[in-house]
Image (tube, rainbow, N blue to C red):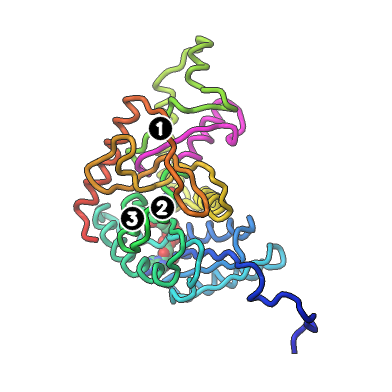
Amino acid sequence: GAFFKPIRGAASPSRIKRHTKISVIGAGNVGMAIAQTILTQDLADELVLVDAKPDKLRGEMLDLQHAAAFLPRTKIIASVDYAVTVGSDLCIVTAGARQIPGESRLNLLQRNVSLFRNIIPPLAEHAPEAILVIVSNPVDVLTYVAWKLSGFPSNRVIGSGTNLDSSRFQFLIADHLDVNAQDVQAFIVGEHGDSSVALWSSISVGGVPVLSFLEKQEISYEKETLENIHKAVIDSAYEVISLKGYTSWAIGYSVANLARTLLRDQRKIHPVSVLATGFYGIEGGEVFLSLPAQLGRGGVLGVTNVHLTDEEEHKLRESAKTILEVQDQLHV
Ligand code: 6V0
């Protein structure tokens, strides 16, 4: 018998408004940080975990389920079988192979491409309407690979890209100026990695453009100081990994933030990896890299027309070239 006596005419589950389902593929450090942030921020009615290791997966599922008394109600399920992802609104892919000591980045990438061959087609089959968010590294190339393997329109395939780099950048600028990081508008675009491009010309704090403010006040700033902040952003992932072995909390918050914008149709602008060919003079092949993109329930709604200096535009095209060179050596 049911615990409650049913009330006639009360909505049956099938009559309740369609619910939000998020699937996270890869229950490692990054996948679990994303999953737990999604739960605490009440972003999904149903959260699905998929991983290749059944014991680890079931352990993680139970551990999260046991927090139910402290969380908004979310159904949490896990399986090694992609059928559980059926009808997902959003699929977040964090599965990845670990680098073997001495292994080249290209070899690691080729192994991740093989993983994606097992992951993306079943996702596309079970969740054909989903938005795909790729987190696994190297994220720009793997977002391209996921786009190819899914057959999805490019507006529904997004790489987390420099969303995280940009929040590290905002933190460092805020720290430098002693202001709230949420008041700092600052974008890093291009490749998520060593060739990323800091858009200094468009940084503002509380609506005040920082560079022209400094110039008008005749406050001298060293180009070197600025470059050092960008360098610190690039180094920060390496530093965290060398200290704790992996990164998790910041990427967890940054991807949950993307999930909110996408599923709640917030139409916010995020620097994320999108099909960039044709924007800012990027050409020479199909390439995904981060540009400030407006996101909503339909996925990528558009790319912001920010003003880039000649130098910034040149660096962005070089970043695209770097990614294309890697892509050319791949067997997808
Ligand atoms: P991890 O802790 O090794 O987790 C990876 C998980 O993937 C493991 O649980 C594996 O069992 C699982 N897995 C492997 N193969 C499959 C498969 N075929 N199907 C399903 N699951 C599988 O790694 P971690 O969580 O630390 O990192 C995951 C990925 O995120 C790596 O590629 C990182 O480089 C990348 N990151 C990307 C960031 C970004 O900003 N884009 C930031 C941080 C990490």
Q: Image height check: is 29 above or below 284?
A: below
Quadrant holding the C terminus? bottom left
Q: Which residues are magenta?
A: 166-193
Residue 320 in which image quadrant: top left
Residue type at mark 3 is: Leu
In terms of secondary structure, where does tag 3 sit? helix
The quarter of the image that holds ligand 1 is: bottom left
Q: Badge 2 is on which residue?
A: 155
Residue type at mark 2 is: Asn
Residue 280 in which image quadrant: top left
Identify the residue at horizontal 48%, vertical 71% (top origin): 85
Q: Badge 1 is on which residue?
A: 198
**Residue 12 vs residue 88: left or right?**
right
Foreground tag (2 vs 1):
2
Q: Badge 3 is on which residue?
A: 142
**Residue 45 vs residue 236: left or right?**
right
Q: Are marks 1 and 3 in contact (CB under 8 Å)?
A: no
Tell me if mark 3 has few (under 14), some (14-19) or many (20+) residues whose alpha carbon lies within 10 angstroms of its own: many
Position in image of residue 195 (x %, y %): 32, 38
Position in image of residue 203 (x %, y %): 49, 28
Q: CA distance from mark 1 to mark 3?
A: 22 Å
Q: Image height check: is 196 above or below 114?
A: above
Position in image of residue 252 (x %, y %): 52, 53
